[in-house]
Image: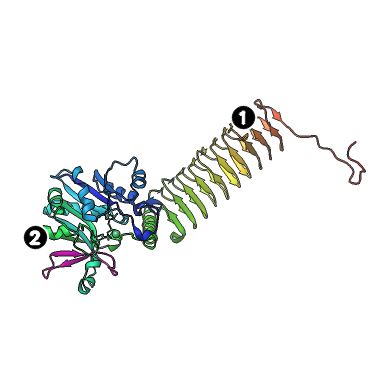
Amino acid sequence: MKISAVVLAAGKGMRMCSELPKVAHKAAGKPMIVHIIDIVKQAGIKDINVVVGHGREVVEELLTGQEVRFVVQEQQLGTGHALLQAEKNIDPDSSVIVLAGDTPLLRSSTIQQLTNFHLQHNSPTILSAEVSNPTGYGRVIRKNDQSFSKIVEEKDATEEDRLVREVNAGIYCFEARQVFKLLQETNTNNAQGEYYLTDVLELIKKTGQTVNIIKIEDAQEIYGVNDRIQLAYVESIIRKRKNLELMREGVTIIDPSSTFIDKDVEVEKDSIILPFTIIEGTTHIGSNCQIGPYSRISNSQIGNNVIIESSRVNKAKIGNQCTIGPYAYLRPQSELHDNVKVGDFAEIKKSIIGENSKVPHLSYVGDAIIGRGVNIGAGTITCNYDGRNKHQTIIEDQAFIGSNTNLVAPVRVGENAVIGAGSTIAHDVAPDTLAVERAKQRSFHKRAKSIDK
Ligand code: UD1
Ligand code: CA
């Protein structure tokens, strides 16, 4: 049986007090809507429809490149109305799983459990959970025999209903033909004047069919974000789960409470993450690395046996056996080959640094191609910018750049060349030569009347 997913994401999320639509807010480095799409995909569902409305350009932009179809809900008239907008996209003979865009803690295994149950029993199925504080959720009301009776929204609930702690997750599986037919029959006779998707369940029951309930163990999974306090909670849970997953896979995290690793980050085994470290986006870290303390690494590729201490690395590529920091800054498009050292207060931008080369202290290297076995002396600067354009510096294999050199780009330093300390090099230096550009040193008696002689 074919299964289509419909993710409801057209609401504004008033309680976020934001210009951004709710589902665009990030939890652990990833917008909530992207979390949910990833989870649905991991459950093996390929046909995904997203109902957008409020801030739809923002949501569509966040999902560029994802294989999803968008359905527009012009006016947000309720969850039932939202689902109905997707009817035109969905084969009436298929099953449909409905999810909300604001529940990023859901697990893909739970989606599979729901869809499998629905297909086996051939019945409409909903997810519920028992929570300690049900405020704000729809309550699942059961009959004496424990079978499903109805869902009552908080605002429509009686005192007695409100005591119920079993809540509706807002995640359901239906037969497409049936749900779209019955949605036509819902109305807005309720406290919020909205078309409630939940009303369809009562209509289904009236046809004589059973509505099944899967009550899940881990109530956290259905936690819906309505405000920024809940967003921070969800963030902390996603991070906790990620740290646990990495530790189980063989990564040492010295202090999980001060370590922030985004969900899609990969770290190979026997790497050690020291406290106060942030690893973001699609970063990949190899094995046996030592990262931190106090480092922030974003969207970068790091090899094996790399040490990064108190440094910032952004969109860079680092080979094996490299040592970075303390206090280094690697900027986008920097590529370090194996066994490179970038030391304290060195900034590297859009440069390639060859195997066994070193930039140990206080340097700026921008728009440069540096060969193998090169030593860049302390304080060396590539003068890559003339006020209008950026120019390239090329330093060939085994060159030795003396301390405090200015390399005025475009410029090339040949293989095995040596630059004397303090030189400003504005012309190419041939291989195997020594270039010095420096005024001759003069010495006078300390009490000489004049130094002009
Ligand atoms: C809904 C359920 C409630 C359940 C809760 C779980 C209904 C009537 N109530 O309530 O029983 O316990 O979810 O979190 O369904 N949306 C649209 N268009 C609309 C309205 C909403 O796309 O016109 C989207 C929202 O963007 C959101 C989702 O539907 O992603 C849920 O809407 P929300 O307003 O948060 O519903 P709740 O009041 O939380
Ligand atoms: Ca909600």
Residue furthest to the bottom: 159
Looking at the image, residue 268 sits to the left or right of residue 423; the answer is left
Q: Quadrant of ligand 1?
A: bottom left
Span of residues in magenta: 130-152
> What amino acid type should be assigned to the residue bearing mark 1?
Pro
At 44% from the left and 61% from the top, the residue drawn is 257
Rendered location of residue 46, percent (x, y): 24, 43
Q: Residue furthest top?
A: 430
Instruction: Tell me how the rendering is colored.
Output: rainbow
Residue 53 appears left or right of 178: right
Say if disc 1 is inside 8 Å of ligand 1.
no
**Disc assigned to residue 88:** none
Q: Where residue 357 appears, x then y in whole percent?
A: 58, 37
Q: Position of residue 285 (x, y in %)?
A: 44, 46
Relative to residue 376, is residue 156 depicted above or below?
below
Mark 2 crowdedness (10 Å alpha carbons): few <14, some 14-19, many ≥20:
few
User: Which quadrant of the figure contains the C terminus?
Assistant: top right
Residue at 41% across, 51% down: 29
Q: Measured along the vertical axis of the image, is residue 430 above or below residue 308?
A: above
Secondary structure beneath dot 2 equals helix
Q: Which of 416/126 is in front?
A: 126
Q: Which residue is mark 2?
A: 206
The picture quadrant where one finds residue 164 is bottom left
Task: Check disc 1 and report the residue beneath it.
Answer: 410
> In front: 69, or 267?
69
Q: CA distance from mark 2 to mark 1?
A: 80 Å
Front residue (pair 151, 103): 151
